[in-house]
Amino acid sequence: MRKLDPFLLSLIGAVTLATVLPCQGIATTVLEYLTDACIMVMFFMQGLKLERRAIWENMRNWKLQGLVLVCTFALFPALGLGLHLVAPGLMEQSTWLGVLFLCCLPSTVQSSIALTSLANGNIAASICAATLSNIMGIFITPVLVSLVLHRHGVWSAQAIGGIAVQLLLPFLAGQMFQPILHKWAHRHKKLISITDRSSILLVVYTAFSHAVVEGIWRQLSLRHIATLIVVDTALLVSVLVVTLLVSRMAGFASRDEVSLILCGSKKSLASGVPMANVLFPASAAGFVILPLILYHQIQLFLCTLIARHYHNKHLADV
C-alpha cells in the first residue's frame, strides 16, 4: 500500500491548524496579501519550468494530445454534471460546488510525467500533454467554471483582472525570462518545489480559516466527507476506464496508452488551489478546495498502482 507522502501530511496539518487556530482580523488581511504574492511567484516559477519546445516537438501526435484535452476539459465536466443531475441531494451544495470546480481543472505536470516514466510510457508526449493542459487551463478553466456552475459572478471583470494579474502575467513573465533563468531553475528544482508547495499550503490555510469561521465542520460531517471520497473515486475510476477503452479503440501503442490514461485522469492541485482563491469569495474557497485535496491523494494512489502494473507488464514482455 502506498504511504502517505509528506506533502499530503502537510496539507492535513494546514487544515488542522486552520481548524484549531484560524486566522482572523488583521491577520487575515495580511495573509491574503501574502497569499496573492505567493501565487504570483508560483506561476512565475511555472512559466520558468514549462518548456515550449516540448509542446511543439510532440504536437504531431495530435490524436493523443487532443484526447487528453478532451478528457480533461470535456469528459470530466460532463461526468460531474451528469452525477449532479442524477443525485443532487447526495452532498451539500457547497461540496458539489467543489466537485464541479475540480472537474474543470487542468491536468498535473510533475506527477503525470513521473508516473509515465515509472510505467515506461511516452514521456515526451506526457510532458507535452500536461504542459499544454496547464497553459490552456489558465484560460479554459474560468470559462468552464462559469458555464458549469452557472455563476456569472465567476466570469466578472474582477475575476478576469485577478486571473490576469495573479496567474497569467506572472506565467508569461516566467516564459519571457526562461531563456535567461532556465538553467538556474533546472539547478534549483528542489527550491522551486519547496516554494510551490509552501505557497499551496499557505493558500489552503487561509482558505480553510475562512471556511472554519463560516462553519464548514458544522455543515460537513464524517458521513459527508466519506460520501465525497466515494464521489471523487467514482469520477477518477470512470475516467480511467474511458481512457483505457478509447486508447484501445484508437489503436494506441502501449506507451501512448499510458500517457492518455495517466495525463487524462489527473487534476492539478498546484493550479486548482490558486484558481479557487482567485475565482471564488474567501468564504467559499475552503469548501471548494476540499474535494480537490481528497482527489489529489486518491489519484496518486490509484495511478501509482496503474503505473506499477504497466511497469511490471513491460518487464514481463522484455
Image (cartoon, rainbow, N blue to C red):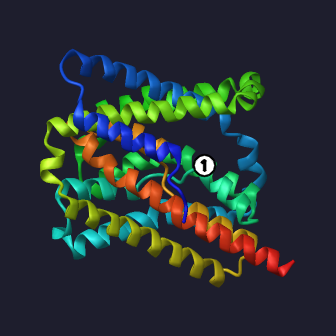
Residue drawn at point x = 39 percent, y = 59 percent: 103
- Residue nearest the observer in this picture, 237 or 2: 2
300 lies above or below 169: below
Residue drawn at point x = 29 percent, y = 48 percent: 288
Please tell me whether mark 1 sits on a helix, a strand or a loop: loop
Dot 1 amino acid type? Val
Across and down, in percent, residue 246 comes to 59, 79
Q: Residue 249 appears in which quarter of the rendering?
A: bottom right
In the rendered image, the residue lying farthest to the right is 318
Residue drawn at point x = 57 percent, y = 31 percent: 194
Quarter of the figure that contains the N terminus = bottom right
Across and down, in percent, residue 216 comes to 18, 46
- Residue nearest the observer in this picture, 305 or 292: 305
Across and down, in percent, residue 202 comes to 39, 30
Quarter of the figure that contains the C terminus = bottom right
Label 1: which residue? Answer: 109
Within 10 Å of disc 1 (Cα), the crowding (few <14, some 14-19, many 20+) is many
Q: Is residue 281 visible?
A: no
Across and down, in percent, residue 157 comes to 30, 32
Residue drawn at point x = 47 percent, y = 42 percent: 271
- In the image, 310: left or right of 223? right
Q: Residue 87 appears in which quarter of the rendering?
A: bottom left
Report the number of discs. 1
- In the image, 219: left or right of 311? left
58 lies above or below 171: below
Q: Residue 78 appears in which quarter of the rendering?
A: bottom left
Q: Is residue 112 visible?
A: yes
